[in-house]
Image (cartoon, grey):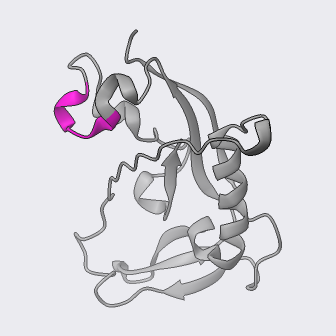
């Protein structure tokens, strides 16, 4: 069984209902968040075991469940559906523009199970032919990755 990761669907997930501010509201970042040179991607990989379906019901797609939950969460946490923008003072005046454009969401499938790689408990469990970048979302078209508050791959 191969480790190849195939990305099957890519899209922006928007809030599933109206959000409080008018489109385009600008939220100031803290002085710490505006420090030039501190703007970077934080890569994080989380592994969860699938829960057993109750009552013999069909098991829903994890990606579909998480995508729906993300749309609901973005209603209350609407800045994550926006974009980082620089203010008139350049990168040192960055803010979040609440555009509602959505968080970048990538659906992918691996050619192995978590059991095959021991739940990725150890970085060495990732075969050499695989790249760790395959386990993280690729770039959204037309948007610089540092302008997105949230990207995920399921």
Tell me the quarter of the picture where residue 79 sits: bottom right
The image shows residue 88, relative to residue 99, as above or below, that is below
Residue 4 lies left or right of residue 15; in this view the side is: left
Tell me the quarter of the picture where residue 123 sits: top left
Q: Does the magenta stretch include residue 57?
A: no
Residue 83 lies left or right of residue 19; in this view the side is: left
Residue at 42% over, 85% down: 29
Q: What range is drawn magenta here?
A: 119-126
Report the predominant secondary structure element of the magenta stretch.
helix
Q: Quadrant of the N terminus?
A: top left
Residue at 76% over, 83% down: 22
Residue at 29% over, 21% down: 130
The image shows residue 97, relative to residue 114, as above or below, that is below
Residue 8 lies left or right of residue 113; in this view the side is: right
Q: Quadrant of the C terminus?
A: top right
Residue 82 lies left or right of residue 14; in this view the side is: left
Foreground residue, 144 or 88? 144
Name the residue at the top extreme: 1
């Amino acid at each position: 069984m191969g480790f190849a990761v195939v990305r099957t669907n890519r899209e922006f997930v928007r809030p599933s209902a109206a959000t409080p501010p008018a489109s385009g509201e600008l939220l100031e970042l803290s002085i710490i968040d505006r420090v030039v040179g501190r703007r970077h991607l934080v890569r994080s990989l989380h592994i969860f075991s699938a829960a057993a379906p109750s009552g013999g019901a069909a098991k829903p797609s994890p990606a579909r469940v998480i995508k729906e939950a993300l749309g609901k969460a973005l209603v209350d946490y609407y800045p994550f559906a926006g974009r980082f923008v620089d203010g008139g003072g350049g990168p040192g005046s960055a803010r979040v523009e609440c555009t509602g454009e959505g968080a970048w969401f990538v659906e992918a499938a691996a050619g192995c199970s978590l059991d095959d790689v021991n739940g990725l408990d150890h970085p060495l469990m990732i075969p050499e032919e695989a790249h760790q970048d395959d386990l993280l979302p690729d770039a959204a078209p037309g948007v610089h990755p540092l302008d997105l508050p949230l990207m995920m791959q399921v």
